[in-house]
Amino acid sequence: MTTKININGDIQDEAFISILDHGFLFGDSIYEVICTDHGKPCFLDEHLKRLYGSASGISLDIPHDPEWIKTQIQATLDSAGNTESYIRIIVTRGVGDVDIDPSSCFHPNLIILVKQVPQIPDESYEKGIAVALVSIKRNSRDALDPAVKTGNYLNNVLARVEAQKSGAADAIMVNPWGQLTEGTTSNLFFVRDGRLLTPEKDCGILSGITREKIIQLAQENGMALEEGKWPGEELLHADEIFLSGTVKKVMPVSILDNRPVGTGKPGPITQKMMRLYGELLESLT
Ligand code: PDD
């Protein structure tokens, strides 16, 4: 159960960052979350590609190459010695003037936090979780593009708070045009008449690594899948809903806005995808 923090190549038990870092002052940072499976970081190349994509999305130069980051991740994992780990890579703009202009920040900070993977109760996977379609909108792509994984998650924080007030564990957000987007830290899939549906990237979502794998699995296994644009109300007619993400993997949703989804239990397509994704992770080892 050890936590280790690697700051710019220095591995410590605890770490501190200046309050003058623009990551702290303005949420001017990017991040990635990776989990290990059998001790090995899963889909590491895909996550690093997205990290560099996010950096370019906020005009931030990461002062190291992917190989350096990989070496540092391994050193931090070895130092923590957990069976399975949660890895969070954060790159901040660095210390500068107390002014939003990033040009006073010359040294981005690269932090790798390694800790035990958060335990999600088996019951959540067996019974499904409750979500709420909230009033907080997902940022529009031409405001803060959700495809860029920045450290500015206040939009999602507020959505989660609204969901929790209604008794739900997570939120589903629509974009400013009322189209379905995603959860607060996960992508959205739902089933109508046997077809697996997921909001397309144009709706303003993070292009989830898990989402991509699910789309591939659906295609390889002859499952009908469609990426598209749907109004929020469409979800009220879903036969099944599930969320996807690095930590949650494939998480069934059994309650939407305090009403059962379909039969109120994880449905057959969700269960099939849970199994296929589990097998995919197994096959990587
Ligand atoms: N979140 N959408 C959002 C807004 C996310 O933050 C995430 C991931 C996803 C799923 O992406 P992926 O399958 O690549 O994990 C979708 C991570 C887990 C987090 O912030 O903790």
Image (tube, rainbow, N blue to C red):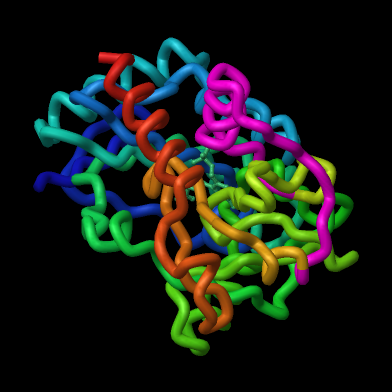
- Camera-side residue of 91 and 271: 271
Q: Residue at x 19, y 45 (%)?
A: 116
Q: Position of residue 277 (x, y in %)?
A: 40, 31
Looking at the rendering, in which quadrant would you find the C terminus?
top left
Q: Residue 63: say if magenta.
A: no
Q: Is residue 77 visible?
A: yes
Mark yes or no: residue 104 visible. no
Q: Nearer the viewer, residue 78 or 281?
A: 281
Is the residue 65 above or below the residue 133 in the image?
above
- Give whichever of 198, 62 is nearer the camera: 198
x then y, percent, for residue 103 = 74, 43
* Residue 133 location, quadrant: bottom right
Q: Is residue 273 left or right of residue 143?
A: left
Q: In this view, which residue lies farthest toward the bottom?
A: 165
- Quarter of the rendering containing residue 88: top left
In the rendered structure, which segment of residues is drawn in magenta? 205-233
Residue 171 versus residue 279 in the image, above or below? below
